[in-house]
Amino acid sequence: MITHTLIKAGQYYDSVTLLQVAQTLLKLDGVTDAAVVMGTPANQGILRNADLLSPEAEAASPDDLVIAVRAMSRSEALNAIAYAEETLTASQRQETTQQSAPTPRSVSTAARQIGDANIALVSVAGRYAADVARQALQQNLHVFLFSDNVSVEDEIAIKQLGRERGLLVMGPDAGTAIINGKALGFANAILTTPPTAGGIGIVAASGTGLQAVTTGLAQRGIGITQAIGTGGRDLSAEVGGIMMVEAVKALQADPVTEVLLLVSKPPAPEVAELVLETVRKSDKPAVVCFLGGKREPIEAVGAIPASTLERATLIAAELATGGQPTHAIAALRERNQGLKEQARELKSRLSRGQKCYRGLFSGGTFCYETQIILSKMLGNDKIKSNAPLSKAQQLASANVSEGHSAVDLGEDEFTVGRLHPMLDPALRNRRIVQEARDPDTAVLYIDVVLGYGVHPNPAGAAVEAIYEAQERLKRKKREVIFLAHVCGTDADPQDASRQVEILQQAGVIVMPSNAAAARLAGYILR
Amino acid sequence: MSQLMDSVKPLAEAIVSLDLPGVCCAAAALCGLGPGLTPSGDDYLAGALLALWAGHHPHRYELCSAIREGTAGRTTTLSQAFVVAAARGEANERWHTLLSFLGAQSTESKENYQQIKRAVSSISTYGATSGMDMLAGFEAGLIWCTTARQ
């Protein structure tokens, strides 16, 4: 009987591999006993009792792997040891040859591996996100920070660091950006300059806002240079617009960008001032869409105000193609006149008790924009929401509409433990049926958002519920006016034109923009 | 492995009789014992330590201390880290899941029973034998807790 031992020091082998080696050793020719254990005192005791404790095994430390084999002959013992050695080495190699290089475990290793990386996408849980973002910034990477639940303090700190290093920090809670033609987060297939006409550089503190203008421009054949998302909180008083200012400066210095387009909810007043000062210093024409914000401060710095996303898109389009903003404004006015006509006809379909608007939104900015428009048309205190313009308009329960209601289904109360409505239509579909059941409902609106990373057929999914609702309505001899708008392009995976068709086939009136739909609803209901 | 079972009995006796030096010795004998990167004996101890916390053993601080002391230098660095963590009442996600279901109000309900089953199953598949070894220790630990409160 010959005993041979192999000691493997300072290596990591997972337990499953060790078990497999041990089991196989015992099956090899001539092997009468084998052990594959870590060199702990307790295991050395076992080896001793089994007559497998060689001097090398005795000298081993707890972190050493001990492979001991007893066989009938020397050659069989050596053979078994060789097998163990090979198998263990192979298991290590496998880990590294499964991919072209070992999986990096740190931002710095990953950055080194890619070599010419210039941006990091961060999507870890909020409380770790700032740390990871910081590491990325230290590696000279711009950051797209998809994570939410990042504290304001963290946001300020990493944006200040980004500013110091001349790097962008897009986010937190950044839904969208399009950088050098590459879509990050929820974004659409749009056109970039060159080779198309355009040259519009966008900075948006709103994900769906960014999607609305980029897709609106793309559908008109107009390209953008960059669409930089700053995250929804960038223009708050605390954060102070750090990234919007940096982004505007960057676009100002960018030779390919010819027109600036800013999109946001109204910033805190001192932040609006700061941002507009930066815009004033720019020699490129600028369109500023602070939804529901005041025109005068914008005009005062020589920029063009736009009160809706649609207006912003059309004015920017004029500027990019050498046209006149006034043309866009006039065209919109005419279009809106046409809506009044359309509203008259639609109103005749309603029964007497049907008086209410119900908007079911997947895009928070669309919900916001709609409330601004409908408040003006129907009365400030008349639109309720779970994400209202003012506290007084808060819905008692987000699950139950009251009067005119605009419900943002992407808000936290709907998305904890559940996918966002752009990914999973189930919740909105149930709500569609629920609203249709309500005899007060006159107009029901949904925003249909397309793009990479969202549901493959949002229109198809929604019309399932709409058909069901219409069945029930037919039995009650009632009609609800279904409105929608599709935010996307024909180049998107879902194909905007096809999505429009699907909706129209279900009797949904598809409007060219969220604002148009809100306006039409307002004309119907006032 | 009979050696493992032989080493478990002294531990149980020492814990039940609150013989701290005995606990320390028994833990030392179990520690580092058996196959695996985290030897089976360690996994058993880790499971038992978690049970002392989860079951609110009245003397859990001293017992966990004694067990931890017994393991010093007698096992792999990796395994030691897990044992030390368990001695502090720290565990991985699968254990947290199980503990949350065990601690739920309606432990009698059918749904809760299914949840516990699934959580145990998830732990049992951990590693080569680690999960099962830990569960064995955990079960033993819970029994010691019940005994202590009588």
Image (cartoon, rainbow, N blue to C red):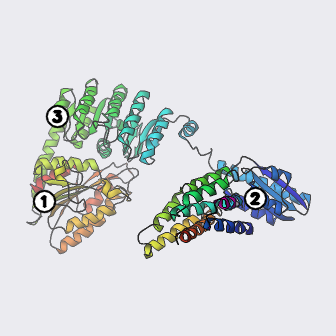
Q: Amino acid at mark 1?
A: Leu
Mark 3 to mark 2 CA distance (whole Å): 80 Å
The relative height of residue B121 versus residue A187 in the rendered view (above or below) is below
Label 3 sits on residue: A295
Mark 1 to mark 2 CA distance (whole Å): 84 Å
Task: Give coordinates of residue B38: x percent, y percent.
Answer: 66, 57
Residue A43, numbered label: 2
Residue A513 visible: no
The relative height of residue A507 versus residue A188 in the rendered view (above or below) is below
Secondary structure at badge 2 equals helix
The relative height of residue A156 versus residue B120 in the rendered view (above or below) is above
Magenta segment, which residues? B17-25
> Foreground residue, A70 or A426?
A70
Task: Give coordinates of residue A278: x percent, y percent.
Answer: 28, 26
For the point 22% across and 68% down, which residue is it?
Answer: A470
Instruction: Output the chain of dot 1.
Output: A
Mark 3 vs mark 2: which is more N-terminal?
A: 2
Q: Are marks 1 and 2 in contact (CB under 8 Å)?
A: no
Residue A346, numbered label: 1
Instruction: Output the chain of dot 3.
Output: A
- Magenta: predominant secondary structure element? helix
